[in-house]
Image (cartoon, helix red, strand yellow):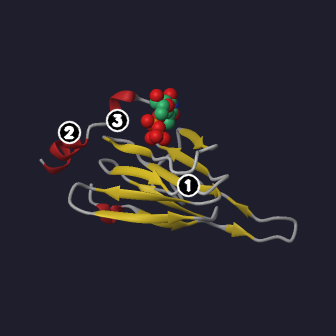
Amino acid sequence: MPLADCKIIQLPKISDPRGNLTFVEGGNHIPFDIKRFYYLYDVPGGSERGAHAHRGLHQFIVAMSGSFDVVLNDGKQAKRFHLARSYYGLYVCPMIWRALDNFSSGAVCAVLASSVYMESDYIRDYPQFLEEALT
Ligand code: TYD
C-alpha cells in the first residue's frame, strides 16, 4: 500500500486539572479493529527496533511517554515521523517497511494492532520486501 495511506492521527484529549485523558476506539479513531496491544520500553539509547514489514497487519503507534522516530518506506519513498505526545499516533498500513530509532530515555512505544502475533505475517528481509511491494 502507498505511503500516503500512513498518517498521523490526532486523538481526543480530555484536558483536566486532575490529569489529561486520551482514548482510542478501533474502527472509529483508527481504521481497524484492535486485536492486540504491545509496547516497547527500557529501550537503550541508540537502539533501532522494527526493520521489517507486515503483509496484512494494520498498526497504530503512540509515544505514551518520551519520544522516538518512525521511518516508513513503501519501497518507492521513505518518510520520517517524530512521535512525542500521547494524544496522537501514527497509522501504519500493511506492506510498509518500518524502523524505529532516536528513542529518548524513558520512551514507551505503544502499538495497537489489527491481529494477534503471527510470524508468517512478517517480511524481515528487505530485498524480499521490495519484491513483494513492487510487483
Ligand atoms: P519484533 O516485532 O521483531 O520487534 P520490533 O519490531 O519491535 O523490533 O518482535 C521481537 C520478538 O518478540 C520476536 O521474537 C517476536 C516476539 N513478539 C511476540 O512474541 N509477540 C508480539 O506481539 C510481538 C510484537 C513480538
- Mark 3 close to ligand 1, CB under 8 Å: yes
User: Residue 121: x and y, percent?
Assistant: 34, 34
Location of residue 54 by image quarter: top left
* Disc 3 secondary structure class: strand
* Residue 9 or residue 41, whichever sits in front: 41
Q: Earlier in the sequence, mark 3 or mark 1?
A: 1
Within-10-Å neighbours for mark 2: few <14, some 14–19, many 20+: few
User: Residue 100: x and y, percent?
Assistant: 46, 52
User: Residue 43: x and y, percent?
Assistant: 59, 45
Residue name at image x 54 percent, y 47 percent: 111
Label at residue 40: none
Q: Amino acid at mark 2?
A: Gln
Within-10-Å neighbours for mark 1: few <14, some 14–19, many 20+: many
* Residue 126 or residue 134, whichever sits in front: 126
Rounded to the nearest angstrom, the CA distance separating label 2 from label 3 is 11 Å
Q: Is residue 65 left or right of residue 5?
A: right
User: Which residue is the site of mark 1?
Assistant: 103
The answer to whether residue 7 of the structure is visible from this angle is yes
Residue name at image x 19 percent, y 42 percent: 127
Q: Is residue 32 left or right of residue 2?
A: right
User: Which residue is the site of mark 3?
Assistant: 122
User: Which residue is the site of mark 2?
Assistant: 128
Q: Amino acid at mark 1?
A: Phe
Q: Earlier in the sequence, mark 2 or mark 3?
A: 3
Within-10-Å neighbours for mark 3: few <14, some 14–19, many 20+: some
Q: Residue furthest front?
A: 46
User: Residue 30: x and y, percent?
Assistant: 50, 57
Q: Is residue 8 left or right of residue 124?
A: right
Q: Amino acid at mark 3?
A: Tyr
